[in-house]
Amino acid sequence: MVRERGSREARGSRGVVARVEGSASDALDLERARLFALLGRLLSEAPDADLLGRLGGLAGEDGTPLGRALAALAEAARQADPATVAREHFDLFIGVGRGELLPYASYYLTGFLHERPLAELRGDLARLGIARAAGVAEPEDHIAFLCETVAGLLEGRFPGGAEAASRLFARHLRPWAARFFADLEAAQAARFYRAVGTLGRTAIEIEQAAAELPS
């Protein structure tokens, strides 16, 4: 879904962890990148049988909010089948006419699509040299695109690194993403994706708390 201008697509293979073409600044940044890459992958399209199998093996037994969220996702993956999850993804995010949820910053912040938040995001992405991959119809303020972009910045695949990732998060995810993930947790069509909503909300809360720590 995301590529750097003048380069090949940033996500050339599907999986829990996006391919690393640079080096993360430290182990914590790499773990953050993996989490956002996972969220981006699950929100951009339904997981296939291989990914569901790998998700079912996730370990999350440390009792922290993130550990509990990962454990819940693993359990949901073990109980899911690809066809049912694909239908769930369709009902939630695509639908006939529209899905149950509209996962766009513009919608959550203004009530309409293709509004000022999208224009501001495109300006920031242009300054970073990041653009949508060819053939992707969704606008850049889609939650999956934003998660993938944060992951790419944290991994060092895009210029700017962790500092740029933090700025992008603060301006384009923090104002609305927690509400979206809470809505996903409560969505009528959500079964497997209820656990994705919990994981996403937890990730956003962790990032918010980290940003408020004194430097």
Image (cartoon, rainbow, N blue to C red):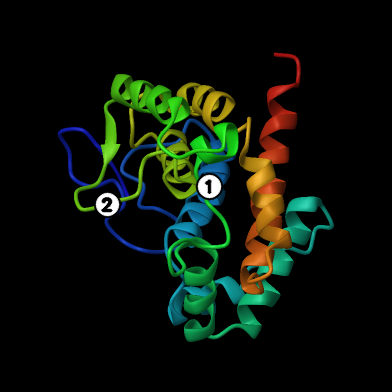
Q: Between label 2 and label 1, give the one nearer the viewer.
A: 2
Question: Farthest residue in the top direction?
Answer: 215
State the image quarter where residue 210 is shown.
top right
In the rendered image, the residue lying farthest to the right is 63
Q: Quadrant of residue 77?
A: bottom right
Task: Tell me: residue 23, above or below residue 168.
Answer: below
Disc 1 residue type?
Answer: Phe
Does residue 106 appear in the picture of this structure? Answer: yes
Q: For the C terminus, which image quadrant?
A: top right
**Is residue 59 among the parts visible in the rendering?**
no
Q: Position of residue 60 (x, y in %)?
A: 72, 63
Few, some or many residues within 10 Å of mark 2 (<14, 14–19, 20+): few
Task: Report the Cα–Cα distance between label 2 and label 1.
Answer: 19 Å
Circle 1 residue: 36
Residue located 18% across and 45% down the image: 8
- Identify residue type, mark 2: Val
